[in-house]
Image: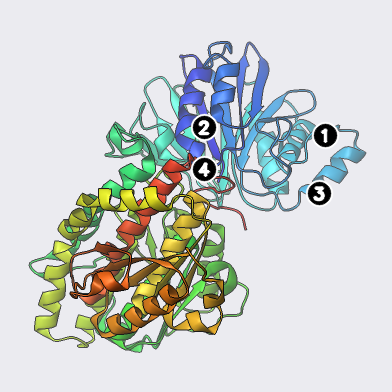
Amino acid sequence: MCGIVGYVGYDKAAPLLLKGLEKLEYRGYDSAGIAVCNENAIQVTKSKGRLKILSDLTKEGQTLPGNIGIGHTRWATHGVPSVINAHPHLSELKKFAVVHNGIIENYIPIKEKLLKAGKKFVSDTDTEVIAQLAEFYYDGNFFETIKKVLSTLEGSYALAILCDDYPDEIIVAKKNNPLIIGVGVNENFVSSDITAVVSRTKNIIRLNDGELAVIKANDIKIYDSNYNEIKRDPFVVDWDICTSEKCGYDHFMLKEIMEQPLAVKNTIGPRIQNGKIVLDDINFTKEELNNINKISIVGCGSAYHVGCVAKYIFESLLRNPTEVEISSEFRYKNPLIDKNTLVIAISQSGETADTLAAVKEAKKLGAKVLSIVNVVGSSIAAESDSVLYTWAGPEISVATTKAYSTQLTIIYLLAIYMAEKLSKITASEYEFYISEIQNLPVQIEKVLSHKDVVKDLAQKFYNAKNVFFIGRNIDYAVALEGALKAKEISYIHSEAYAAGELKHGPISLIEDGSLVVTLATKEDLFEKMISNIREVKARGAVVILITNERPEDINEVSDFNIFIPKVCEIMRPSLAVVPLQIFSYYIALLKDCDIDKPRNLAKSVTVE
Ligand code: G6P
């Protein structure tokens, strides 16, 4: 949510800032801006709308001189998207420029105090108070002034700040929002995300909460929360450029859909050794596992939907009560958890504010927290007792696909691992599950190889006004994700229902031509699903069926069928979800939607 970039070096800053912002646009895209400092004067250019407008306005940055600058792409929280509210924000006398991710909770009293002191504000944002406060406190010492500013602020922030008296340094600070430093040769970068700097440097330093850094072209000084200088060596990221580029695909979403077999393979790879699941990162003893009397899963959006799948798996394999809760609900409900509850937090970004708060709440109540996270070193990972990383690589498209699939993969690994440790499955069942999970990438590949069948269906139905997704048991959990994809990417009103619940209300919405996507991958419930299909068809619905069963009379039941390979029951969501992702993708394409950056959404939601 919102992206920050900064550059200090000997090249022209503005074109580099724009290039960095391009990579961050998926984090927020309602306005953008850059500030450069040249000969002791700060110059700011901002625009409403997509980054392209800012790029055209500045002739790709060429019109702005200066070798130091900061940039921002915004997802509005305080104040509507507009040029005035876009970052960077300047202090009244243009001495300071600030870009900020996060929320300053006490900005109103600070603003009131500064207004009384005669400062004039121009925007509706919380961020502007940071620039104004810096100017108010300024005594000629940039570093000391920012220390004083930070001690006044409450809330969360990743900050990059310029001061016109210091035209060779950027000061950055972090609290509950991600911030990294890209270490180059005769140049350094800052950003909210590694993807923005990786084309220039793979040497990265991650800042921790409470830390501050002073960054020059040839020098980086990092300070801890007590402002003692600390040393931290950069780590090297092994991404190639293709990891964060479209590389021949029209959209990141399609690229990421197609990357799923590899992402799943990478997630499994190091965790199966000599036919055994090795989860070194968690190391629970049998006794600790035995003491777990409840599993409680938290997440938002698609991550929550992974939790819905996980509930069925944990309850069937472990026979352990499992709850799944939307993080924003969990955090305020005084959850019934204790030291014998295993809380599993699922998050691609590892920064989602509600999930982070849920983790903190769970820890406060004494529960053990295990997180499933994609971004190494993220806030949720840092807060958790143990972390199982998904190795999906950077996910750029706002709508998640490969992260969802790798999260499912971790759930399978964890459930099988725990079931074996707790003797809930036999040795031969354990062996069977391991061979099935190792085979999963190939099976996903097979589903992807039939993507044109789904593309043709998208062509038939892209004008649909409503879509219903139905399923039973684990298929219902996948239906939830199908409906979310249809909403967020293709802007189709869609609902997911447990198929048995249809007749308790939703079926009254079915009329001639209503589109119903049904999932039926469980043998024991197949006949029940066929009855549900007959019920909606009798009311005029058109039915697409996703299944692994092939009874002879199937064409008399549904209108269109998508067949997926038969894998073991718990892993079927990994195959069933793929046609749903492809369906939404092609509908969005035909409707000319902005697929990678759907309206009003952001990839990483770091505000409540
Ligand atoms: C946003 C994204 C969703 C994502 C959710 C949770 O709403 O648009 O795709 O599932 O956040 O994000 P997380 O990073 O915690 O998985």
Q: If you read the primary sequence from the N terminus, does the residue marked by circle 2 or circle 4 appear first?
A: 2
Task: Report the Cα–Cα distance between label 1 and label 3.
Answer: 12 Å
Q: Are marks 1 and 3 in contact (CB under 8 Å)?
A: no
Residue type (three-letter) at the residue carrying disc 1: Phe
Disc 4 target residue: 27
What is the quadrant of the C terminus in the image? Answer: bottom right
The answer to whether the beta carbon of the residue marked 1 is less than 8 Å from any atom of ligand 1 is: no
Task: Report the Cα–Cα distance between label 1 and label 2.
Answer: 24 Å
| Residue 64 visible to an observer of this rendering | yes
**Along the line of sight, the residue nearer the viewer: 73 or 549:** 549
**Along the line of sight, the residue nearer the viewer: 520 or 104:** 520
| Nearest-to-viewer mark from 3 and 4 | 4
- Give the label on residue 5, or none: 2
Task: Report the Cα–Cα distance between label 4 and label 1.
Answer: 27 Å
Q: Residue at x 65, y 33 (%)?
A: 87
Task: Report the Cα–Cα distance between label 3 and label 2.
Answer: 27 Å
Q: Are marks 3 and 2 in contact (CB under 8 Å)?
A: no
Q: Are marks 1 and 2 in contact (CB under 8 Å)?
A: no
Residue type (three-letter) at the residue carrying disc 4: Arg
Disc 3 target residue: 108
Q: Residue at x 61, y 54 (%)?
A: 607
Which quadrant would residue 39 be assigned to in this image? top right
Q: Residue at x 34, y 70 (%)?
A: 519
Residue type (three-letter) at the residue carrying disc 2: Val
- The number of discs equals 4
Mark 3 Cα-neighbour bin, 10 Å: few <14, some 14–19, many ≥20: few
